Image (cartoon, grey):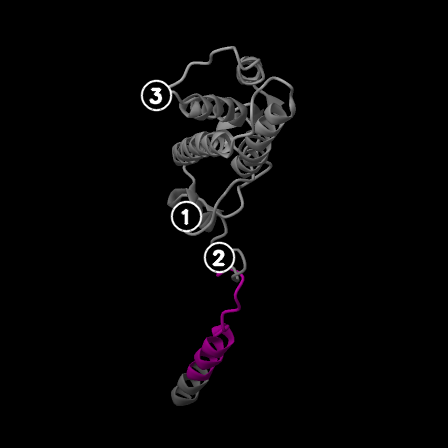
Amino acid sequence: MRIRKPFAGGFIGICAVAALAGFSPQNYKLPSYKQSDKVLHFIAFFALTFAFYWILETNRRKVLQLTFTVCTIGLAFASEIVQGLLPNGREFDYYDILANVLGSLLAVALCNWYHKRMLERKRAARGYGAVAGEDIDEGDVELGESLGGQESGVVRSGTAAVEEELDRWDENAEDWEDTDVPDNTNGKAQDSSGDLADNKKRSD
């Protein structure tokens, strides 16, 4: 598991800006849309979640679970709770939490969709096909993780299967050269000797 430093730096930077804006005194005017800062909350958590999703190089399912837990649940609620506890004149607002969660959910959905499409294209380029109804996330091939063997739930292309079948062709069958063929030589010899004896008797 590796860390993508550009995304990690972007996440830290967005967190710093959001913290300075959200935890600042009330007399500090934040950008707003129609006297509401809900759009700002939505955009901030969309950007936070987007950056956090791509920090870790691991399989899609783990990234999805971690991002949802940390950003959509943890930061979305904790930021508003801390803001209400600080003596900065700001009040706890449920609608701010709603805006945070919606922005984070949108980022998670978009990143997860793109991540899945990226995996499918990579597998298709390598000649693999996912079995219908199964989600293959044991290793993200496009993230540089080496797979120890064939992926679980993956079938190989038709050409590979045919080649393997030809390699194993008739390996358990008996060799036709080694099979016992009835020996009719003695019978033919006896018939010949019998014919010679009959001819000799007739000549006598």
The disc at residue 162 is 1
Give, as a three-letter code, the residue at label 1.
Val
Q: Residue at x 49, y 80 (%)?
A: 190
Looking at the image, is mark 1 or mark 3 nearer the viewer? 3
Q: Quadrant of residue 24?
A: top right
Per the image, the residue denoted by label 2 is: 170
Against 166, residue 63 (above or below) is above
- Residue 145 pos. (x, y %): 57, 29
Q: Give the mark, 2 or 1, whose residue is nearer the N terminus.
A: 1
- Give the distance between the C-alpha atoms of the residues marked 1 and 3, in whole angstroms: 66 Å
- Residue 140 pos. (x, y %): 52, 33
Q: Residue at x 38, y 46 (%)?
A: 158
Q: Say what secondary structure mark 1 lies in.
A: helix
Q: Would residue 177 be counted in the magenta stretch?
A: yes
Q: Say what secondary structure mark 3 lies in.
A: loop
Please state if 65 lies on the left or on the right of 200 as rendered.
right
The 10 Å Cα crowd at callout 3, few under 14, some 14 to 19, many 20 or more, is few
Residue, far left: 34
Against 186, residue 81 (above or below) is above
Taking depth in this image into account, of 108 and 22 the one nearest to the observer is 22
Please state if 108 lies on the left or on the right of 5 as rendered.
left
Q: Say what secondary structure mark 2 lies in.
A: loop
- Residue 15 pos. (x, y %): 56, 17
Q: Quadrant of residue 87?
A: top right
Q: Which residues are magenta?
A: 176-195
The disc at residue 81 is none
Per the image, the residue denoted by label 3 is: 34
Give, as a three-letter code, the residue at label 2.
Asp
Q: Residue at x 61, y 23 (%)?
A: 2
